[in-house]
Amino acid sequence: MKTLELTDLQIAFHGHLRNQESSIAQEVIDGGRISVDHRLHIYHNAYRVRLLENLRDAYEKTWTYLGDDTFDASALAFIEANPPRHRNLRWHGAEFPQFLAEQFPQDADIAELALIDWQLRHAFDGPNATPVQPTELAGLSAEDWESVGFRFAPTFFIAPLRYNTVSIWHALDQEQAPPTAEALPEPSWLLIWRKGWQPHFRTIQAVEQAALSQLHGGASFAAVCAALGEQFSDQEAATVAGESLGTWLQDELIVWLTGAH
């Protein structure tokens, strides 16, 4: 029997782990108390156990919410359909919220909860950035304010929410029984970022979401203020813009000024 090259052995072994046709059994020396099939089964099972542990860790609140049986069944189905594509397990599971949305189409709170889990996890070890200080804005000229825009923290993330998922997350975080999932009277948005070394999230309403999305897309702060002026009186627009800017600075969302001369 011809011995396979290392690369071919790795491909054959990977195929066995993935339930694909494989010749790896022919390459394993038969001997000792454990049969070839049993040995290979140990690795076959360990592969799934390790990936399942990784998903449980990344989606801790979702795991608690669904319970062991339901979560594990969904996670194992996901593993079969979505094997790791990166050497670093950090990235495995990114598609799990969408997978859950398809598995539980009538329970959108599950996918929303999973999305919170995933984004908080990745905000924790996301790239660093130094927040802009209020003194930097104070030094801008009137001309600068006509064109200045903001670049947000690398961990900045916004997603729509349709259910009381944030209340569910908080209850689970405090080890309390979660409330019954209910659709929100009006859709809101979830903002996630990291402040210092700690991930944060809060719900935001349509006005702030629109402003943040415009700025994130490259609009100037003046353009955002003009858009607010179309919705509110001049006084109200100025108040909303000023309070929002103060909140973003306090939250350390802004990390770079763009467009200033």
Image: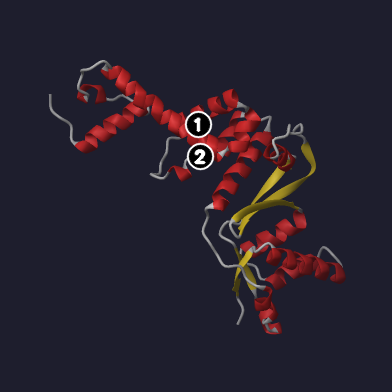
* Sequence-first disc among 2 and 1: 1
Q: Verify CB contact (< 8 Å) between mark 2 and mark 1.
A: yes
Quadrant, the N terminus: top left
How was this image coloured?
secondary structure
The residue lying toward the viewer, choosing from 215 and 3, is 3
- Kindly identify the residue that appears in the image at 74 percent across and 59 percent down: 208
Q: Name the residue under label 1.
A: 78
Q: How crowded is mark 2: few (under 14 residues within 10 Å), some or many (20 or more)?
A: many
- Residue 220: x and y in percent read 66, 71
Q: How many marks?
A: 2
Q: Which picture quadrant has residue 66?
A: top right
Residue 24, x across and y down, in percent = 25, 26
Against 178, residue 205 (above or below) is below
Amino acid type of the residue that numbered disc 1 sits on in the rendered structure = Phe
Describe the element under mark 2 as helix, strand or loop.
loop
Quadrant in which the C terminus appears:
bottom right
Residue at screen point 65% across, 67% down = 219
Give residue 110's position: percent from left, percent from top.
65, 34
Residue under the point 77% across and 35% down: 182
- Looking at the image, residue 248 sits to the left or right of residue 69; the answer is right
Is 120 situated left or right of 32 in this image? right
Per the image, label 1 sits on a secondary structure element best described as helix
Q: What residue type is labelled 2?
A: Gly
How far is the residue under mark 2 from the one under mark 1? 8 Å
Name the residue that disc number 2 marks.
Answer: 93
Quick check: 241 above or below 74?
below
